[in-house]
Image (spheres, rainbow, N blue to C red):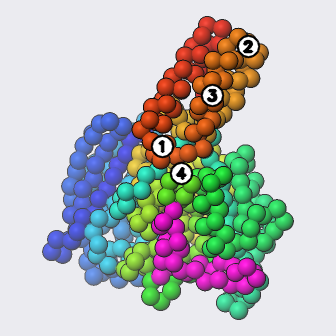
Amino acid sequence: MNTFEITIQPKSGDRWPIVADHSRPGEQLSRSEGTLVMTPEDVQQLRDFQARPQDYGKVLGEALFQGQIRDRFVSALRESQESLRILLFIEAVDRELKFWRWERLCAPIDNNWQLLALEQRSPFSFYIPAITDRRFPPIGRRDLKALVFVASPSDSQRYNLAKFDVAATVDSVRTALGNIPTDVLATVEGAIAPPTLEALCSQLTDRTKQYTILHFVCHGKLMDDGETLLYWEKTDHTVESVTATRLLERLAPLRGARGLSHFAFLCACESASPETEGSLGGLAQRLVRNLGMPAVVAMTDKITIKTAQVLTENFYRQLKASGEVDIALHEATASLAERGDITVPALFSRLGARPLFSDQLDRELTNSEIKYGLERLAKLLSERAPVLSYPFEEQAQKLRNIIGTDVAALSKQARKERKDALTEVNNLCDRPILNISFMR
């Protein structure tokens, strides 16, 4: 898939320089430059169109897509045989610029101004580089495991929060995740713990588990000081107010394979409000920028329970099919286009053109894939070539001894032994009597 990355650079005089790079994997196709100018009249229109997402997005689009930028975008969309991935990187730190609701951005498509959030041909997301050295190695489908966190405190009414059906919500998310292994933090039967901050951190550091997906359903709001606030629960099920700063401080020390997840879905109102960009930034933005999480879907404003439920169901169905977060989010909105709050969900990511997970073996095998392969191969050997079981078991045991440990944490000698054992197992797979791929 081709990518069209738009970078809004720091302000120069009364305008912001723009650079747009059109590329495909391994090749840059073109670079175009322009400027973003917003007149006082344009800014006033943004205020007037707060309740009219498409009109609001058109004002932003007309200011952004001008001259070379517009021509190159139209040409790139026309020439792309597949979808054209749109990445918006707001490098500028201007308070005013980041206050604008860029998730409503419209682009010139089919001689009209179309909301990118609803345009299936051009999946749109915010690109956010990380400021941390935290590593998130590539993963495959077999590495997917979800931790679902659903909080609706018993005293929600004291905080003017609408109660919702926790059991129905959990069932809905579980159904959406399908065959992805899932644990639940909620006040429902079958949950492994209540939805508290302590329980979340405890599960993320459990050496027997490795969650690659975090899904949160709770109430949230933007505070007067620009901080994101989440309404979670204490052990007695009453409200526990958790700020984004407090949450990040608890998550920041978690490292390695049993630590922070690769993806989070924040089904909480205003968990990515652009108004927070004038201070510390929304929770979603900070999870990517400060902690290095590869991708986060979050809400830029208030969203209805019905929209959130259908969006979740559609999103995970599409994600499991493709592994591409931006495509999954855009396809998930297809049946919701007429809802007034459908521009609220947004994707913040540092994946660029990469998928969240991939079954393509153009990378090192993950521990989950090795475990699955060993189990499958042991069964095939007993059926087809019992004589090879002993040399296989010798190498398999070496791998079993270390596949519970993050590869990055292994010593140089242990990594070499892991590589050698994998080579020997793959050699067994190449025997004519087997003739199989280790992971297939």
Q: Note whether 261 is above or below 58 in the view shown.
A: above
Viewer-nearest of discs 1 and 2: 1
Q: Which of the pair 123/213 is nearer the observer?
A: 213
In the rendered image, which residue does mark 2 sit on?
386
Provide the residue span drawn in magenta: 227-254
Q: CA distance from mark 4 to mark 1?
A: 12 Å
Whether pointer 4 and pointer 3 mark residues with C-beta atoms closer than 8 Å, the reply is no
- Identified by mark 2, the residue type is Pro
Q: State the residue lying farthest toward the bottom.
A: 158
Q: CA distance from mark 4 to mark 3?
A: 21 Å
Which circle marks residue 410 in the picture?
A: 1
Q: Residues within 10 Å of mark 1 (few under 14, many from 20)?
A: few
Instruction: State the residue at coordinates (33%, 52%).
Output: 5
Instruction: State the residue at coordinates (51%, 32%).
Output: 418
Instruction: State the residue at coordinates (41%, 66%).
Output: 290
Residue 133: where, in percent of width, then height? Answer: 37, 57
In the figure, is residue 114 to the left or right of 265? left
Residue 137: where, in percent of width, then height? Answer: 47, 46
Q: CA distance from mark 4 to mark 2?
A: 35 Å
